[in-house]
Image (cartoon, rainbow, N blue to C red):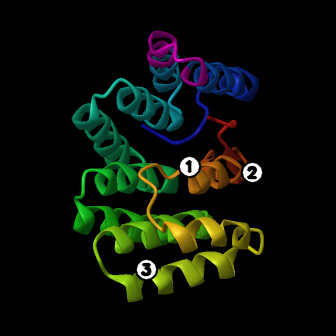
């Protein structure tokens, strides 16, 4: 599978992305899965993100990981897939795997370094490595001048079970490379809850 918008054009993919993430927000997992299948038919890597989030929301954690692994085998340069994999693994207390996922995401050009570093900090903290957590948090805050607004939250509870603040930041950043004929610029996913 390529990471581009094969067939259907950009406006069709953008519409599907909006519809899929709106379905997730509304709790309509059936519609989210259906949209993910359509995105996969069009060859767009966001199908894996959407399907994994829907499986996670349904409590199907191993299936979410399976979808992400399949996505990463086909589109290893999509940093948001590495971040989602890390988030799920961190929530499962599988810290070594989570840390590796975040590091792999950080190695991708154009990734959201602040979001990935923030999640890396959370996983280090949960794993009991406070020095590494502080270092990753410093990197996250250095990457994004707006991130210090998270400092009070981080200072009181560095490891909320959900990665809400970092996920919100990631929603606002390009995640899925979508090579066009002349411009391989990434296209952001639409906002999600």
Q: Residues within 10 Å of mark 1 (few under 14, many from 20)?
A: few
Q: Are marks 2 and 1 in contact (CB under 8 Å)?
A: no
Q: What secondary structure is marked by label 3?
A: helix
Give the mark nearer the N terminus: 3 vs 2: 3
Disc 3 and disc 2: Cα gap in Å? 40 Å
Q: Which residue is mark 3?
A: 133
Magenta-colored span: 24-34
Residue 101: x percent and y percent?
Answer: 35, 62
Disc 3 and disc 1: Cα gap in Å? 17 Å
Give residue 164's mark.
Answer: 1
Q: Is residue 25 left or right of residue 185?
A: left
Q: What secondary structure is marked by label 2?
A: loop
Residue at image position (69%, 37%) is 191
Residue 43: x percent and y percent?
Answer: 50, 30
Of residues 82 and 57, which is closer to you in this image? 57
Q: Which quadrant is the C terminus positioned in?
A: top right
Q: Is residue 147 left or right of residue 127?
A: right
Q: Which residue is mark 2?
A: 182
Residue 9 appears in which quarter of the rendering?
A: top right
Residue 144: x percent and y percent?
Answer: 71, 72
State the predominant SS element of the stretch in magenta.
Answer: helix
Q: What secondary structure is marked by label 1?
A: helix
Of residues 182 and 89, which is closer to you in this image? 89
Q: Is residue 26 magenta?
A: yes
Residue 61: x percent and y percent?
Answer: 27, 36
């Amino acid at each position: 599978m390529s990471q581009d918008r094969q067939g259907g054009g950009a406006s069709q993919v953008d519409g599907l992305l909006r519809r899929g993430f709106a379905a997730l927000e509304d709790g309509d997992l059936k519609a989210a899965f259906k949209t993910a299948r359509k995105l996969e038919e069009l060859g767009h890597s966001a199908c894996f993100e959407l399907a994994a989030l829907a499986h996670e929301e349904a409590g199907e954690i191993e299936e979410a990981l399976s979808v992400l692994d399949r996505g990463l085998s086909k589109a290893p340069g999509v940093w948001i897939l590495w971040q989602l994999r890390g988030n799920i693994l961190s929530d499962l207390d599988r810290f070594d795997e989570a840390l590796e996922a975040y590091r792999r995401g950080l190695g991708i050009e154009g990734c959201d370094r602040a979001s990935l570093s923030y999640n890396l900090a959370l996983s280090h903290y949960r794993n009991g490595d406070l020095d590494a957590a502080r270092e990753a948090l410093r990197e996250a805050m250095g990457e994004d001048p707006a991130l210090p607004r998270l400092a009070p939250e981080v200072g009181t509870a560095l490891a909320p079970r959900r990665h809400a603040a970092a996920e919100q930041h990631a929603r606002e950043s390009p995640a899925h490379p979508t090579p066009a004929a002349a411009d391989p610029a990434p296209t952001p996913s639409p906002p999600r809850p």
